[in-house]
Image (cartoon, helix red, strand yellow):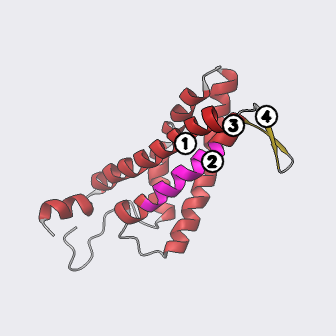
């Protein structure tokens, strides 16, 4: 593999990881926002739904589905591109990633409700703003917890990273 390609695939510093995480999160974000828009405008035609005994609005159902789709895409890209050097098992990484995503979901939900119900923002505009507000915290939580990597970059023998 050429050095140019290797430098893109394997981060040489936290800045490389951050850049790749931005790419990973960006793709997940696009999937999330696009799915939110599709579900909000084209799938849910009622304002309120009753699911498992809960009263859920169309914006919350759209968030639940779109967030899950974005998380799945984000996990796969993050695992194989950003933190591929993690020694944790895939199952452990996935469970931790999902745990962080669940916390992130409720943080997004709180911010989204605040923006929609208190600031009267249009839901498809409030959704990306809610997601972007949590981005940087997400990088560090996933690095330290989901993929069990320290903030310092450690070179491994035979690896020039």
Residue that badge 3 annotates: 44
Which quadrant of the figure has residue 10?
bottom left
Which contiguous range is marked in magenta?
63-76
- Magenta stretch encompasses residue 161: no
**Label 3 SS:** loop
CB under 8 Å between discs 3 and 1: no
Q: Quadrant of the C terminus?
A: bottom left
Residue 111 appears in the figure? no
Residue 35's tag is 1
Residue that badge 4 annotates: 48
CB under 8 Å between discs 1 and 2: yes
- Magenta stretch encompasses residue 70: yes
| Total labels drawn | 4
* Residue drawn 65% across the image and 20% down it: 120
**Label 1 SS:** helix
Q: In the figure, is residue 53 to the left or right of 95? A: right
Mark 1 neighbour class, 10 Å CA radius: few under 14, some 14 to 19, many 20 or more = many
Relative image position of residue 77 (x, y in whole percent) = 41, 59
**Measured Cα–Cα span from mark 1 to mark 2:** 8 Å
Residue that badge 2 annotates: 65
Mark 4 neighbour class, 10 Å CA radius: few under 14, some 14 to 19, many 20 or more = some
Mark 2 neighbour class, 10 Å CA radius: few under 14, some 14 to 19, many 20 or more = some
Q: Earlier in the sequence, mark 3 or mark 2?
A: 3
């Amino acid at each position: 593999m050429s050095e140019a390609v290797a430098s893109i695939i394997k981060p040489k510093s936290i800045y490389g990881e951050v850049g790749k995480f931005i790419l990973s999160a960006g793709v997940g974000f696009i999937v999330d926002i696009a799915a939110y828009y599709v579900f909000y405008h084209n799938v849910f035609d009622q304002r309120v739904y009753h699911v498992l005994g809960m009263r859920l609005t169309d914006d919350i159902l759209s968030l639940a589905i779109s967030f899950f789709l974005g998380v799945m895409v984000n996990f796969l890209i993050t695992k194989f591109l950003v933190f591929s050097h993690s020694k944790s098992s895939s199952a452990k990484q996935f469970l931790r990633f999902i745990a962080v995503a669940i916390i992130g979901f409720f943080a997004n939900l709180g911010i989204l409700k605040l923006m929609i119900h208190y600031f009267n923002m249009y839901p498809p505009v409030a959704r990306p703003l809610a997601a972007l507000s949590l981005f940087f915290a997400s990088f560090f939580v996933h690095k330290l917890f989901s993929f069990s990597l320290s903030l310092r970059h450690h070179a491994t023998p035979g690896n020039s990273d």
